[in-house]
């Protein structure tokens, strides 16, 4: 019996018998119970993962829709591709023209990349600015980034040091409020950041390429072209340029210039192969096994009534360092 019922019974026994007028007011309808949907254990996983390379003034627009990453959450459940594995996650955004509620506009679509690996895939960030000729490969911590354990919602009341996490996310501790104190070129660097990855067991595109970019300082305007030392014959290549944009008196200087660029490219390729060979030789057996077993998964938001449908925009390409994902979800 409920406590309220007991109190009512005791009250009737103690008060004297008397005729009471029964109230004619209608009883107030009982208020319907309110139900709040329980939060899913990994519901904020995609939000906690920093979207690397997104412009600071576009960050808020990433979260303007209630994107659904239940596919990422389910991947950690039994039977999922990430279940029981050590996983490193980083985010990025892909600008797409999307339609939502009869309105079309360009939106920053969030994407999460999951790297299954027993070791962190890299502790470096690549910076590729169109203003700079060469890329920069720098430590993550220089950009206030790093891998940190993700604590699921159900474990957040526990002592963090007692929670053994298998999920690590790339986080950035740089606050937008502090950007005004930084030099503009450093602020812009964040927009050109790409999570860096080096696969020592695989030749990259530069090692395999036989093309060189030529910017010959001719007068009145420089000559821009690409020369392939395996496919192009230098004399014939130069004669064709003379017909179009190179003067006859610049022919010998142009040929020497191209030969120099080819020598530089071949030397760079040899050095890259040697560095890769040396890296493999010096690598621990644990690291070798990690690289050989590493797999990349790319997660897009699933279709939901609260956000645009991006199912037609899915691509396996991650970035120029990681290449393509093994699987797109």
Image (spheres, rainbow, N blue to C red):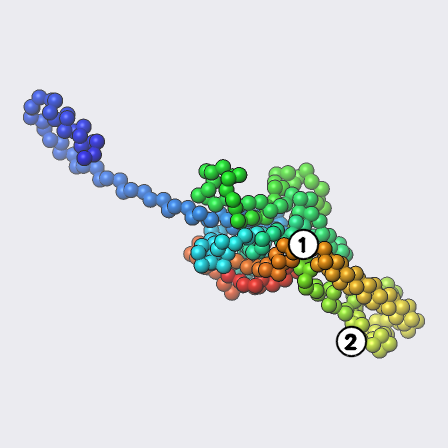
- Is 288 left or right of 257, judged from the image as shown? left
In the rendered structure, find residue 127 and report the number of the disc placed on it: none
Determine whether the residue tagged by mark 2 lies in a helix, strand or loop. Answer: loop
- Is 93 left or right of 132, judged from the image as shown? left
Q: Is residue 183 visible?
A: yes
- Is 134 left or right of 88, judged from the image as shown? right
Rendered view: 286 above or below 231: above
Rendered view: 142 above or below 111: above
Residue 111 coordinates in the image, percent (x, y):
55, 56
- Is 187 left or right of 221, judged from the image as shown? left
Q: Is residue 194 visible?
A: no
Label 1 – label 2 distance at C-alpha: 40 Å
Residue at left offset 32%, top offset 42%: 34
Residue at left offset 13%, top offset 31%: 23
- Say which residue label 2 marks: 231
Determine whether the residue tagged by mark 1 lies in a helix, strand or loop. Answer: loop
Instruction: Tell how many labels.
Output: 2
Quarter-of-image position of residue 78:
bottom left
Mark closer to the chain start, 1 or 2: 2
Q: Residue furthest right?
A: 249
Q: Residue furthest front?
A: 285
Q: Residue furthest bottom?
A: 236
- Say which residue label 1 marks: 284
**Quarter that holds the N terminus:** top left
Residue 224 coordinates in the image, percent (x, y):
80, 66
The answer to which of 257 and 240 lies nearer the viewer is: 257
Residue 236 coordinates in the image, percent (x, y):
84, 78
Quarter-of-image position of residue 219:
bottom right
Residue 61 coordinates in the image, percent (x, y):
54, 50
Residue at left offset 49%, top offset 59%: 81
């Amino acid at each position: 019996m409920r406590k309220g019922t007991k109190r009512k019974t005791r009250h009737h026994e103690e008060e004297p018998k008397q005729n009471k007028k029964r109230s004619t007011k209608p009883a107030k309808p009982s208020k319907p119970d309110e139900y709040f949907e329980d939060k899913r254990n990994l519901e904020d996983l995609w939000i906690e993962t920093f979207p690397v390379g997104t412009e600071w003034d576009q960050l808020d627009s990433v979260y303007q829709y209630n994107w659904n990453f239940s596919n990422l959450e389910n991947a950690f459940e039994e039977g999922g591709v990430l279940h029981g594995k050590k996983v490193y996650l980083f985010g990025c955004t892909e600008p797409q023209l999307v339609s939502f509620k009869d309105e079309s506009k360009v939106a920053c679509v969030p994407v999460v990349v999951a790297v299954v690996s027993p070791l962190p895939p890299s502790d470096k960030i690549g910076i590729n600015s169109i203003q700079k000729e060469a890329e920069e490969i720098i430590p993550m911590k220089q950009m206030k980034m790093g891998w940190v354990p993700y604590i699921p919602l159900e474990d957040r009341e526990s002592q963090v040091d007692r929670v053994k996490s298998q999920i690590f996310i790339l986080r950035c501790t740089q606050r937008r409020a502090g950007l005004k104190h930084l030099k503009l070129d450093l602020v812009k660097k964040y927009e050109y950041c790409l999570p860096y990855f080096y696969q020592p067991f695989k030749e990259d595109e530069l090692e395999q390429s036989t093309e060189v970019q030529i910017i010959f300082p001719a007068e009145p305007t420089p000559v821009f072209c690409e020369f392939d030392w395996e496919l192009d014959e230098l004399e014939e290549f130069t004669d064709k340029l003379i017909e179009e944009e190179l003067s006859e008196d610049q022919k010998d200087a142009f040929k020497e210039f191209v030969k120099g660029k080819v020598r530089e490219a071949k030397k760079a390729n040899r050095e890259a192969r040697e560095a890769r060979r040396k890296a493999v030789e010096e690598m621990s057996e644990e690291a070798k096994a990690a690289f050989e077993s590493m797999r990349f998964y790319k997660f897009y938001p699933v279709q939901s009534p609260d956000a645009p449908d991006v199912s037609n925009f899915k691509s396996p390409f991650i970035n120029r360092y990681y290449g393509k994902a093994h699987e797109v979800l």
